[in-house]
Image (tube, coloured by chain):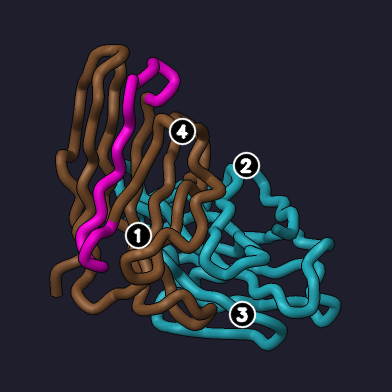
Amino acid sequence: DAKTTQPPSMDCAEGRAANLPCNHSTISGNEYVYWYRQIHSQGPQYIIHGLKNNETNEMASLIITEDRKSSTLILPHATLRDTAVYYCIAPFNDYKLSFGAGTTVTVRA
Amino acid sequence: GAGVSQTPSNKVTEKGKYVELRCDPISGHTALYWYRQSLGQGPEFLIYFQGTGAADDSGLPNDRFFAVRPEGSVSTLKIQRTERGDSAVYLCASSLDPSSYNEQFFGPGTRLTVL
């Protein structure tokens, strides 16, 4: 798996956009970048994935740099329910997710 | 619709005992995965099933761990001679198929405590 690096924690104000960075400088050309999150005492939840183009769905947007060495997950309007650990994953085999430590995001009222 | 379910939600056992953890995937999902999550860490891959067969069991820590999926739906993770280090949350996930375009849907996990 490509090694990913994320900040251990970050705070965000409710209603504001949360921008979560991830470095994956060793990613290969055919490795997707996946984002999952894990709310306390629940199983991880898929958010979004991308290869080289920016992606958007109902949960978030994913911005991948042109050199693919880093990406940013954007939660456009963070709510208290978005408080969770967010994992950036670049699996070599798409089924074998390697979660790492993730970023603990705390959304404050 | 129903998501992935896991039973029991909590299991407390004594060192040396045998335990079985059950996973009911989403109906129609052919791929099933087991992960283990220790306190304060991210989940770690254990085993992946495509249908009834274990396509990749490289994450199983040793031969005390075994998993089956006899009919291609429900899966059971079996741990023999449990050790205190086996204490963790065991997560099961399923996906429609293992291609990269399908996300994994996780269950709530079984918290195993070995005393």
Where does the image place residue B62, in percent across and percent down from the top left?
50, 32
State the residue at coordinates (29%, 75%): B29
Label 2: how many Cα within 10 Å (few below 14, some 14–19, many 20+): few
In the picture of the structure, the residue carrying the numbered disc 3 is A50
Label 3: how many Cα within 10 Å (few below 14, some 14–19, many 20+): many
Which amino acid type corresponds to the residue marked 3 in the rendered image? Answer: Gly
Per the model, the C-alpha gap separating discs 2 and 4 is 34 Å
In the picture of the structure, the residue carrying the numbered disc 4 is B63
Tag 4 near tag 3, CB within 8 Å = no
Tag 3 near tag 2, CB within 8 Å = no
Tag 2 near tag 4, CB within 8 Å = no
The residue tagged with tag 1: helix, strand or loop? strand
Q: Do labels 3 and 1 share a chain?
A: no
Say which colour chain A has. cyan
Q: Nearer the viewer, mark 1 or mark 2?
A: 1
Q: Is residue B83 above or below residue A63?
A: above
Position of residue B43 in the picture relative to residue A6 (left or right) = left
Marked residue nearer the N-terminal end (1 or 4):
4
Which amino acid type corresponds to the residue marked 1 in the rendered image? Answer: Ala
In the image, the segment drawn in magenta is B69-86
**Is residue A28 something one can see in this rendering?**
yes
State the residue at coordinates (68%, 60%): A21
In the picture of the structure, the residue carrying the numbered disc 2 is A8
- Which numbered disc covers residue B93? 1
Q: Nearer the viewer, residue A35 or B115?
A: B115
Question: Residue A52 lies in what quarter of the image?
Answer: bottom right
Q: Is residue B19 above or below residue B82?
A: below
Q: Nearer the viewer, residue A76 or A45?
A: A45
Position of residue B72 in the picture relative to residue A56 (left or right) = left
